[in-house]
Image (cartoon, rainbow, N blue to C red):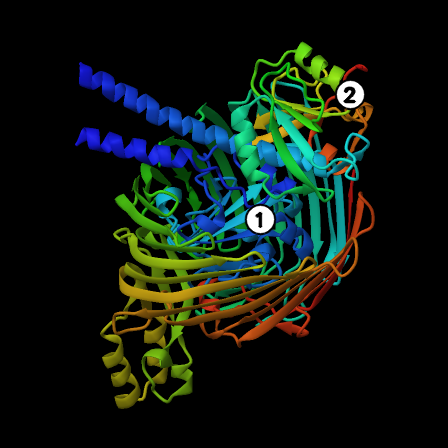
Amino acid sequence: MKKSVLLFSIVSANYSFANTPELDDLSFESLLATDVQVTSAMKRTQEAKETAASVYVISQQTIKNSGVSSVAQALALAPGMQVRQIDNNKWAIGIRNPSGRYTSKLLVMIDGQSIYNPSLAGVYWEALDIPVYDIERIEITRGQGGLLWGSNATNGVVNIITKHSIDTRGAYLTAKAGNHIDHDVSIRLGGDVDIGNLLSYRFYAKKQKTVASDQSLKWTARDNGEKSSVGGRVDLAINDDTSLLLQADYTDITIGQTLELVSFTTHEGIEFFDDEKRTHGQIMFRIDHRLSDTANQMLQMSLSKQNGYQPYYKERFRHYDIDYQVNMLMGETQFDFGLNYRYNKTPFTKSDFIEPVNQVEFIKQYGGFLQANFELVPEQINLTIGNRSEHNSLTGWEHQPSVRFTLDVDEKQFFWASISQGIRVPTLTEVDFDTKVNGAKVSDIITTNIPSIDNLRIESYLRSNKNIESEKIISAEMGYRIDESNWNFDLSLFYATSNNALNYSVDVNPELFPMLAQLLFIQGDVASAVEVINQQSIDLNLVSTLKAESLGSEVVINWSVHNNLNLQLGYSFTTFRHTEDFSTNLTLSGKLEQLSLTMSTSPAKNHSLFSHLRWESGELYLTDSYAIFDINWRWQINNNIALSLEGKNLLERSHLAYARTNETFSVPTYIDRRIALGISIGF
Amino acid sequence: MKCQFITYLLLVYVFSVSCVHAAEREDAIKAGLIFNFAAYSHGDWFNSVFDNSYFICSESKPFIEVGKKVLKHKFINNTPVKLIHLKSLLTSGDKCHSYYFAGKNVQEQHITHVKSINKKVMLIGDTSAFIEQGGHINFIVIAGKLRFEINPDALNQSGINISSKVIRLGKIKRTSNRG
């Protein structure tokens, strides 16, 4: 048995020796971005077109030509991404499920460092303020990413990869202003020093001030904003085999907002306005070491501090993590394994609206993963199997196994399929916080036909549950790609079932209805009935008992019409339903649909024109379906100076993108039509 | 004991084949970059009217084998690219337009020898002192990716004007004038 295994290895190794590695793109930029080794410490070893997952890459060229000025805006360019602006500052972003202000199914990283916040769940997109011109690419994986990236990557992974500092030497200044932007300025300085193979660095500073929208869903729009950020990166190549990376960023934001907070007397949501203030700081250190031509290892450590002030919530979040990973090639078989430890410190100060009841002040996670990629038929059929096992202090051990299969049908056609389990770990809101929410109207429970009774609201709370289980999602996916010389086609299909999805049970005093009936219909004593109602409370108790399923698809077609014109058509849909016989506001049912058309052209030398048209269904966001049209013209005047003129949301004066007000205290605003003029100078 | 020894030999063989596969990848990227260095240059070191082919030379046979496949059907100024294997570092390379010194055994005398035969040739290497020894472009590996050091002055002296785009992408290294 042992000999036959070895013979198999020799045969497959010999076969591979006869084949030269393929480089489809011999452009400078592509070659400089290609890893010298087949194994890569960043868990990315293949081109997107050969990956057994639904992936999309937003390139730096697209970021530059589109004129986007934030990561959130850039993500809207990717077909299948659910990107909704809540107001001028806040975003709801997700994949394969209705996005929310707080979504715990999308893992977001910068250069492999997670920026996910487990307290209220999700990412504070308004505080993610890295300069977009320093982003090399954004890799989006739609679907399960749990094996490689950990928990809470059940619906997707966004990895923002910044440029190596050797590629950002010199000075670079940008400035932008428009009807929505008072000013947006930044400066970046970079250089190199002869230490080791090379030490290179860059530092940046940026400042932005924006004005409020014209119209709010309710009351007055106050979503202006001010942001300041500084940061930098240092790369040291000690020798050909070892390199170090040190990266740090600090952001300070003050953003206006209109909130709907509960009145303590009427239990009704009332207008409240106060700024949100946040400071985010993070630092990351990584060492990459090439063990041999076929193996490398990586050690990464990071620290993040997020402080937030809201009228309803004060937050001091600390996150430490350490990751170690080895990638190696043995013959044609690739092995990856890693260990990780994460410590999230989440001290919380009680507020009038949110109270910690189970005193969860930290969440610890540790675990590891192992993955093997086997070439069953050389250059044709690959099988990847693996598992991640992770222990967290809320739910214990969780496992995320995965099997992926790829088939190179021929040089141009590629087929892949996978089945995997992903885990969503509960958030602090679910296990520790009792939250005061808008009171339920009496008429939602019982109709008395007495307006002074029916319009009363009963004090209501969303109650946490320390016994909430993690949500387990089993996902089956498949995809097919065709790559021709001037067009390509990418189709993904998926079906996912979820156990222990989040829901709540309603707990109302059973004596309430007989008491009201007695007082109102027998005694006619309205005043006493009002007094009884004011003494009641309703508990919405979080439970993890729901079963749900989703089914959907993404299609992307790229067509290079000729050298100067590229078109991209994207379509995605997802349907959701519960497999139990009741509805809930927490786990939605319905359908999401999106259609997009992107055009990128160079109408004249040194000019580029980028346009993006997108239609979105509104059902699950409680809005109308709408279409948006963005356009950006860029003129590279000379090697150093470029001008840009952008228009966003040009089809309508304003539109509402998000209206699920029960999910957030923030009151959404209408997103206005925007025009901005920008200049960038590099030397 | 015999079985263990055979097993060890077989494992070494498997690993060594893996190493060759990995080295081919690096050679493929280098071949692509060498092609780009030429494509983004102009000057009298190469005349597409009189030269039938653009010759890339190296004493490394594995590099030439890989380069032939990667640069098959590639052209520079409508002139086909061809790769030539030279038997040693001291073999005459008078036809070469680009010369790649592979390996770590390159010494200054090898570079001087090539220059003495052919003053107008683009010299590319991957040893730490290659630029100081008179070379023009030197490959380095940074964070697992290939980058390069470049001496634009030395290139100009060899009749090669390389695009500022290439210079910006590399690390400029200037030395005192060499012949």
Relative to A185, does residue A222 appear above or below in the rendering? below
Q: Residue A455 vs residue B8: left or right?
A: right
Q: Nearer the viewer, residue A241 or A624?
A: A241
Spatial CA distance of label 2 from label 1 is 57 Å
In this view of the protein, can residue A354 be seen by the observer? yes
The chain that hosts pointer 1 is A
User: Which residue is at 42% across, 63% downward?
Assistant: A97
Do the residues at discs 2 and 1 belong to one chain? Answer: no
x, y percent for residue A73 = 60, 57
Q: Nearer the viewer, residue A176 or A595?
A: A595
User: Which residue is at 40% across, 32% downward?
Assistant: A325
The chain that hosts pointer 2 is B
Quadrant position of residue A28: top right
> Mark 1, residues whose alpha carbon is within 10 Å: few (<14), some, or many (≥20)?
many
In this view of the protein, can residue A425 be seen by the observer? no
What amino acid is labelled 2 in the image? Lys
x, y percent for residue A419 = 30, 54
Q: Nearer the viewer, residue A371 or A426?
A: A371
User: Which residue is at 30% across, 60% downward?
Assistant: A501
**Quadrant showing the N terminus of chain B:** top left
What amino acid is labelled 1 in the image? Ala
Q: Nearer the viewer, residue B147 or A195?
A: B147
Q: Which residue is mark 2?
A: B119
**Quadrant showing the C terminus of chain B:** top right
Q: Which residue is mark 1?
A: A127
x, y percent for residue A18 = 42, 35
